Image: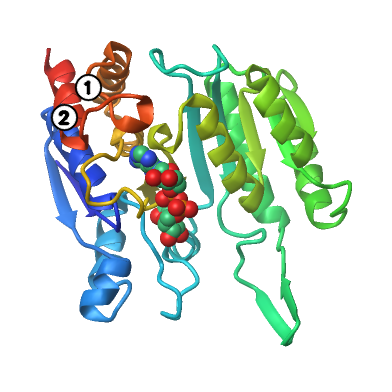
Amino acid sequence: MYDITLIPGDGIGPEVIDSAKQVIEATEIDMNWDIVNAGADVYAKKGILVPDEVFKSIERNKMVLKGPITTPIGCGFRSINVLLRKKYDLFANIRPVKKIKGIETPFKNIDLVIFRENTEGLYSGIEVKEQEDEARAIKVITKKASLRIIKEAFEYAQKNNKEKVAVVHKANIMKLADGLFLDCAREVAKSYPHIELQEVIVDNMCMQLVMNPSKYEVIVTTNLYGDILSDLCAGLVGGLGLVPGANIGRDMAIFEAVHGSAPDIAGKNIANPTAVILSGAMMLNYLGENKRSKLIVDAVERTIEEGKYVTVDLGGTASTTEMTKAIIQNLVD
Ligand code: NAD
């Protein structure tokens, strides 16, 4: 029996989280879902963005499956997501991006994983407005945080027989901050002589990824570049509805899709549930439930390849509910 904190979130969150819950339960795993919520909806109802019970549940279970959250402007919080990642030191944001058969994309081979530093960089929350017409955002790069995310990327590459790790930076301009991140990558790479370190400047990386993404296997980068490259890579494989993610710390993890609460399609039962379902599969893998995780991934891939029950973003006409049912059907067959 696993105790899991389940946070439905805002917008399409409750719809896609419900799909993921159903699919995970179809693997006949014994789950005790501790359902708590945070975000704009909770704020509108209770006047509080993250009720205490959310923190308590996360701290008790240490394992979270989460829907996207909207942080309303003027509520005193910069971002609930950034807050959770920093509060629980979830330093590694891991986002696998893989081409799924059945989706038309310009590239045949895309199979890469982005390791995004999740606790500092330009998301450190240090912004100052010294005068009416001048604002500053401070980018924080520390050796400690850089080394641990880069090591995580190299360890992943080693375990998964990858030959290359690309460090993405802008050290040619930000010589001190990004220079430190790049130096850390060079230092870590020395311990993995069989893995090639690719050093790529972020603007060049954007071009390389849209021209020849199969050149890359593992990407490690700072917080903001990782955020932007994740969405870019999602676009390469068919959109934000497909890419899962994990925020990993030393003894705690939050699994969530790369996408946000998609207010433009919320409540219409048309959101693609794949990204959150695959985030659930990543969670099962993390828990050591590798067989069940693979069952889910295979069922999702089969459903998309069949193409009969896929959502509008993938060129289909199925609702979220219909696609979820088809995935469950493929899973149990
Ligand atoms: P978004 O990811 O919500 O949406 C971008 C586009 O992708 C929209 O057109 C949307 O319809 C589409 N899309 C996203 N997910 C989809 C899915 N599952 N199926 C089909 N289409 C999908 O990004 P946004 O509009 O920039 O952000 C909306 C809100 O979400 C903001 O408040 C933002 O702060 C929040 N957000 C939260 C998280 C998180 O909780 N981890 C992440 C990103 C954004």
Answer with left or right where residue 308 lies relative to residue 256. Answer: left
* Residue 213 appearing in the image: yes
Q: Name the residue rendered at 88%, 53% in the picture.
A: 175
**Is residue 190 in view from this perspective?**
no
Q: Which mark is residue 255?
A: none
Instruction: Kindly identify which residue carries mark 1.
Output: 309
Q: Taking 144 as reference, is 101 above or below it? A: above
Q: Position of residue 229 (x, y in %)?
A: 61, 40
| Residue 318 in picture, x, y percent from top left | 22, 28
Give the residue at mark 2: 322
Among the 4 quarters of the image, the one containing residue 286: top left
Q: Position of residue 285 (x, y in %)?
A: 33, 30
Reading the chain from its start, which is encountered first: label 2 or label 1? Answer: 1
Compared with residue 128, is residue 323 higher up or lower down, i.e. above or below?
A: above
Pick the residue in front: 284 or 250. 284
- Residue type beneath disc 1: Tyr
Distance between the Cα atoms at labels 2 and 1? 6 Å
Dot 1 lies on which element? loop
Instruction: State the residue at coordinates (17%, 57%).
Output: 35
At label 2, the amino acid type is Glu
Quadrant showing the C terminus: top left
Query: Horizontally, is 125 left or right of 202 in the view?
Result: left
Is the Cβ of the residue at disc 2 closer than 8 Å to that at disc 1? Answer: yes
Q: In the visual, does 283 lie left or right of 189?
A: left
Residue drawn at point x = 56 percent, y = 25 percent: 112
Q: Residue at the location (25% across, 43% down)?
A: 16
**Quadrant housing the N terminus:** top left
Closer-to-camera residue (57/266): 266
Number of numbered discs = 2
Q: Colour scheme in the image?
A: rainbow
> In terms of secondary structure, where does tag 2 sit?
helix
